[in-house]
Image (tube, rainbow, N blue to C red):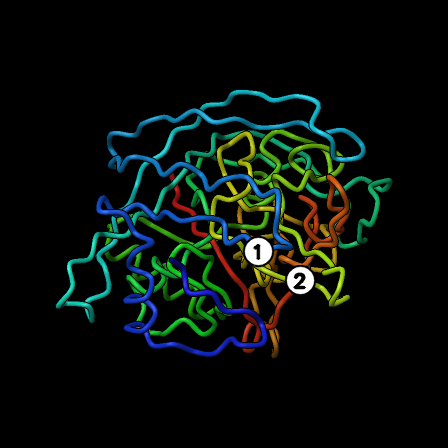
């Protein structure tokens, strides 16, 4: 089972302590499995996403899944069957566990078709920030994006750095600096022979929206089946904050999970921070300043796992599709997912 650690007990564990404790979360075939880490205040979560069979880049396969559309109060008004294409990278396991038989660690990459979308939020979207405008049309080439955020097992398969606040192999890896995320991408590119990188901000929002124009990819309000949340414990009168294993929340129309929350922190993008979209690229590329500032700031997306929950919906501004904020390059940390150019 994943190693349970709450905020008050988080501390660094060595890769050996973490992986030995978490080996039961990996199936013999190498797919990341496990429950959604429920507690008495973590009810009504959907089950973990079904692992996909490993498929090579040159022989992609498709899978079917279900999405939901919600109404103004987050109630599900329609369910739709969708299909997406993917391939799987099988990463070598951590070498320090040489005395153990350890399966390869899968990284599932979903095909994101080329398209055009309206980036940013309209002026009448509740809780919008001025940095989300002006809205502008962006054409995005075809690319591949990680089905989930990079997990602790995937991180340890490539990196020499221990997980700072470990929860288990199938949880998103957190507290990753910009430099370490870039290092992961470089090592992944070297191992696979493909060009892996962080997504541009335009790619991230295009992939998150998956053809929608509403505040969330399920509708105007996020149903708790598609977004991570936190809840006030009745007796303790305090916020119960947690991150679920990847894939515990419904996918969007592209087959991607956990874009609305489910991160202790936000997700890194490749772009430098700009206060608004005036002069932003319209070709889907990252917006990078030619001369770095003394303390450069980078874009992060996707919000956090701290969302106040009601009966069926989670009215949080920070997990909207257009929501954005910034992190310092030198000291900031976040979760991340990878993309691969087609």
Mark 2, Cα crowd under 10 Å, few <14 / some 14-19 / many 20+, is some
Q: Image point 49% across, 49% down: which residue?
A: 36
Is the residue under label 1 in contact with that under label 2 (CB below 8 Å)?
yes
- Residue lying at the far left of the rendered structure: 99
First in sequence: mark 2 or mark 1?
Answer: 1
The residue closer to the viewer here, 26 or 192, is 26
Q: Is residue 102 above or below residue 19?
A: above
Q: Position of residue 112 (x, y in %)?
A: 47, 34
- Residue lying at the far right of the rendered structure: 124
Disc 2 or disc 1, which is closer to the eye? 1
Give the structural element (helix, strand or loop) at label 1: loop
Q: Is residue 121 above or below residue 316?
A: above
Mark 1, Cα crowd under 10 Å, few <14 / some 14-19 / many 20+, is few
Give the residue at mark 2.
240
Counting labels gives 2
Q: CA distance from mark 2 to mark 1?
A: 10 Å
Give the residue at mark 1.
39
Q: Image point 31% across, 27% down: which residue?
A: 61
Q: Name which quarter of the figure residue 222 lies in.
A: top right
Which quarter of the figure is the N terminus placed in? bottom left
Q: Name which quarter of the figure residue 253 lies in.
A: top right
Q: Image point 43% across, 24% down: which residue?
A: 64
Q: Position of residue 51 (x, y in %)?
A: 36, 39
On screen, residue 216 versus residue 155, left or right, reads right
Q: Position of residue 57 (x, y in %)?
A: 27, 36
Q: Position of residue 262 (x, y in %)?
A: 57, 53
Give the structural element (helix, strand or loop) at label 2: strand
């Amino acid at each position: 089972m994943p190693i349970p650690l709450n905020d008050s007990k988080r501390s660094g564990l060595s890769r050996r302590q973490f992986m030995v404790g978490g080996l039961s979360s990996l199936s013999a075939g190498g797919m990341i499995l496990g429950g959604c880490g429920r507690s008495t205040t973590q009810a009504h979560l959907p089950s973990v996403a079904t692992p996909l069979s490993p498929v090579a880049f040159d022989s992609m396969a498709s899978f079917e899944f279900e999405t939901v559309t919600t109404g103004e109060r987050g109630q599900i008004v329609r369910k739709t069957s969708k299909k997406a294409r993917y391939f799987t990278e099988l990463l070598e396991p951590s070498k320090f566990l040489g005395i153990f038989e350890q399966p390869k660690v899968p990284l599932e990459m979903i095909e994101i078709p080329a398209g055009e979308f309206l980036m940013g939020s309209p002026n009448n979207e509740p809780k919008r920030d001025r940095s989300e405008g002006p809205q502008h049309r962006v054409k995005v080439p075809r690319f591949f994006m990680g089905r989930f955020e990079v997990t602790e097992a995937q991180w340890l398969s490539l990196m020499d750095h221990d997980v700072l606040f470990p929860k288990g192999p199938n949880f998103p890896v957190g507290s990753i600096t910009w430099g370490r995320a870039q290092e992961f991408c470089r090592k992944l590119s070297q191992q696979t022979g493909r060009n892996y990188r962080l997504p541009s901000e335009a790619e991230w929002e295009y992939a998150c929206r998956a053809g929608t124009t509403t505040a969330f990819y399920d509708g105007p309000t996020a149903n708790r089946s598609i977004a991570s949340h936190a809840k006030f414990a009745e007796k303790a009168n305090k916020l119960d904050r947690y991150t679920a294993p990847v894939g515990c929340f419904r996918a969007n129309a592209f087959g991607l999970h956990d874009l609305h929350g489910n991160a202790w922190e936000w997700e890194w993008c490749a772009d430098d921070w700009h206060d608004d979209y005036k002069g932003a690229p319209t070709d889907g590329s990252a917006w990078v300043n030619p001369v770095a500032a003394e303390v450069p700031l980078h874009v992060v997306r996707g919000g956090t796992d701290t969302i106040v929950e009601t009966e069926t919906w989670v009215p949080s501004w920070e997990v909207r599709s257009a929501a954005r904020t910034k992190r310092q390059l030198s000291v900031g940390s976040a979760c991340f997912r990878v993309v691969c150019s087609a």
